[in-house]
Image (cartoon, rainbow, N blue to C red):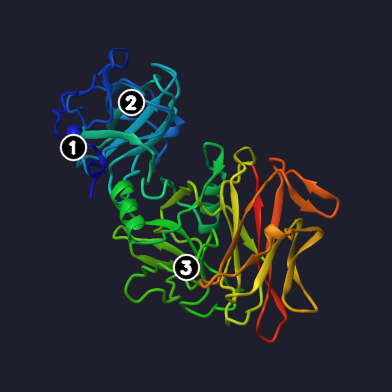
Amino acid sequence: MTLLRTLPVALLCAPALAQGSDDCASAQAITGLGPFSFDASIATTDGAPDSLCLFFGQDDIENDVWFSWTAPSDGPFIAACCGLSSSDTRIATYTGGCGSAASACDDDGCSGSLQSSVRFDATMGQTVLLRIGNYPGAAAVVGDFDIRPARVTNPANGHVYELVSESLGWNDAQAAAQATLNGGVPGHLVTISDQAELDFILNNLAPSRPWIGLSQNLSSSTYSEPAGGWEWVTGEPFTFVNWSTGEPNDISGSGGPENYAEMFASGVWNDAEEFHAPTNQYIVEWGGDGAVIQSNFCTALPNSTGVIGEIRGVGSSAVASNNMTLEASNLPPGQFGIFVVSMTALTTPVPVMNGGNLCLGGQIGRYSQFSQIQQVDASGMFELTIDLTAVPQPSGLVSIVAGENWSFQAWHRDGGALPSNFTNGVEISFI
């Protein structure tokens, strides 16, 4: 598939007349998303070498043509000729005008080809210069390119996604995703809840081989090789499964264990070792309303249903929005429970005399007011909307402040061998 599939029909049908200027000072003015044609078959080399363009021992773009593009909105954008040119292209962007250093540059960013895809930032109304040419020594390029927002919003769930072309290990990719903000909210490696979400990702991002937010928890009570203990980074239920035929198999060409999941261009998944050379992308996701916002820690004990109770926080980790709900699941229906909270997380849980593992330390507060005590419903869940300005602590109610980390757990009555039990623990970093 090509990036053209994501563009409006009106744009696909419009004539692509722009060819580019051989001189930066008279760059061809363009607006919108394209597609735009370029023809560098008789162009000279106008721009200068740049360290950002140093790929495969070459730091220049030969036979270059120039465009002057006006950004229609704020945000990161992508200029790419993936599938739109058969040439060995290079693309650079400049926000400081002719003669300035490049703000971004790419050589083979279209995975599996010699074509280019460069990501750059711009604000609404800003003029960005685009320089397109060929790898030094290669044939002069002719073809098309388009410009699109780097992040796309799924109208079905309000979540935002971005495909990043960078070769990282799985844990490094997850750290990079968490460090990438969208509206002040940190991201995470993508989690996929159903076929509809997967189809949206494939149709709008056109990934080739990215990491996804699925890994094997070797400490899980369900862990076994090769198919046990797989968990999403958000802690949400692992119910939608789309493994490729014969996967996961824990068979690595390098000999290392395969505890992390990548996705092929077709949308099916493969287990891989942490540093997996063919995996050259990752997908970042930011949630809308209902997004899971915590990181999991601590180990729970199975309750009378035979499984481990789970907790998650949904909504927003932004203190200013004060929009967060705690959800507990996999619990015995009909039993009563409460949520507990602390600023101290215990990586080594403490067994409790009347049952379960306590994952919190230090000053522990309880949501135990009459209106806060919940009964587990028939599906094994209970939930409570949390007021971030009134968090119970032994000293009284306190407000959560941006920059603080708070940990939560759910306690519940149990109808089995243990009088009561706990879920796992989750930690939320508030912004």
Q: Amino acid at mark 1?
A: Val
Quadrant location, the C terminus: top right
Whole-percent x and y of residue 385?
Answer: 61, 52
Q: Amino acid at mark 2?
A: Leu
Identify the mark at residue 130; answer none if there is no mark. Answer: 2
Asked which secondary structure carries label 3, the reply is loop
Asked whether 52 or 130 is in front, the reply is 130
Q: Quadrant of residue 179?
A: top right
Asked which secondary structure carries label 1, the reply is helix
Q: Amino acid at mark 3?
A: Phe
Q: Earlier in the sequence, mark 1 or mark 3?
A: 1
Whole-percent x and y of residue 41?
Answer: 17, 28
Q: Earlier in the sequence, mark 3 or mark 2?
A: 2
**Mark 2 vs mark 1, CA separation in Å:** 24 Å
Contact check, label 1 and label 3, Cβ < 8 Å: no
Q: Quadrant of residue 141?
A: top left
The correct choice, above or below, for 220 with respect to 194 in the image is below
Identify the mark at residue 9; answer none if there is no mark. Answer: 1
For label 2, the crowd category at 10 Å Cα-Cα, with few meaning under 14, some 14 to 19 and many 20 or more, is: many
**Mark 1 vs mark 3, CA separation in Å:** 36 Å
Q: Is residue 150 visible?
A: yes
Q: Is residue 207 visible?
A: no
- Label 3 sits on residue: 238
